[in-house]
Amino acid sequence: MSEGQGKFILLYVSNEDSKEMIKHVLDEGVERGVFLKSDLSSKIVEQFDFLKNRGYFPNAMILSQGNDLVEFAFRRHPQQDPNKKLEEFVSDDKFKL
């Protein structure tokens, strides 16, 4: 894979786990505090709500540069309505980005 063609993983972290996650990231030399005005948050929440209403509980988003499709990692509601199920693609190697 050429430089600049990586993937981004955005994870959902509960309030209980957020301090540990931030500590782990900051321990690796990462800094924080740069903000950009963006409607990205509302768009993400909108997509998460759409999935929740269809019986999916999203945990992560996987974004590929140059691709307008967003993959979601999720937990399925145990009584998900089969009529609300979206088309799903299953990879042979679930660890490959």
Image (spheres, rainbow, N blue to C red):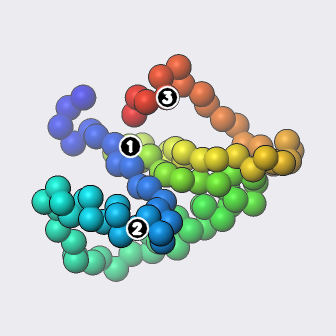
Contact, mark 3 vs mark 1 (Cβ under 8 Å) = no
Q: Image point 26% across, 58% down: which residue?
A: 24
- Mark 3 burial class by Cα count in 10 Å: few <14, some 14-19, many 20+: few
Q: Which of marks 3 and 1 is in front?
A: 3
Q: Mark 2 points at which residue?
A: 18
Q: In this view, does 56 lie to the left or right of 38?
A: right
| CA–CA distance in space, label 3 to label 2 | 25 Å
Q: Image point 27% across, 65% down: which residue?
A: 23
Badge number at residue 64: 1
The three-letter code of the residue at mark 2 reads: Ser
As helix, strand or loop, the secondary structure at mark 3 comes to loop
- Mark 2 burial class by Cα count in 10 Å: few <14, some 14-19, many 20+: few
Q: Residue furthest left?
A: 29
Contact, mark 1 vs mark 2 (Cβ under 8 Å) = no
Q: Where is residue 85 in the image (x, y as percent from the top left)?
A: 77, 43
Q: Name the residue under label 3.
A: 94
Q: Earlier in the sequence, mark 3 or mark 1?
A: 1
Seen in the picture, residue 68 relative to 29 is either above or below; the reply is above
Q: Image point 17% across, 68% down: which residue?
A: 31
Q: Which of 45 and 95 is in front in this view?
A: 95
Q: Where is residue 89 in the image (x, y as percent from the top left)?
A: 61, 31
Seen in the picture, residue 11 relative to 26 is either above or below; the reply is above
Name the image quarter holding the N terminus.
top left
As helix, strand or loop, the secondary structure at mark 1 comes to strand
The three-letter code of the residue at mark 3 reads: Lys
- Mark 1 burial class by Cα count in 10 Å: few <14, some 14-19, many 20+: some
Which of the 4 image quadrants contains residue 35? bottom left
Q: Where is residue 28 in the image (x, y as percent from the top left)?
A: 17, 56
Q: In this view, does 87 lie to the left or right of 40?
A: right
As helix, strand or loop, the secondary structure at mark 2 comes to helix
The three-letter code of the residue at mark 1 reads: Ser
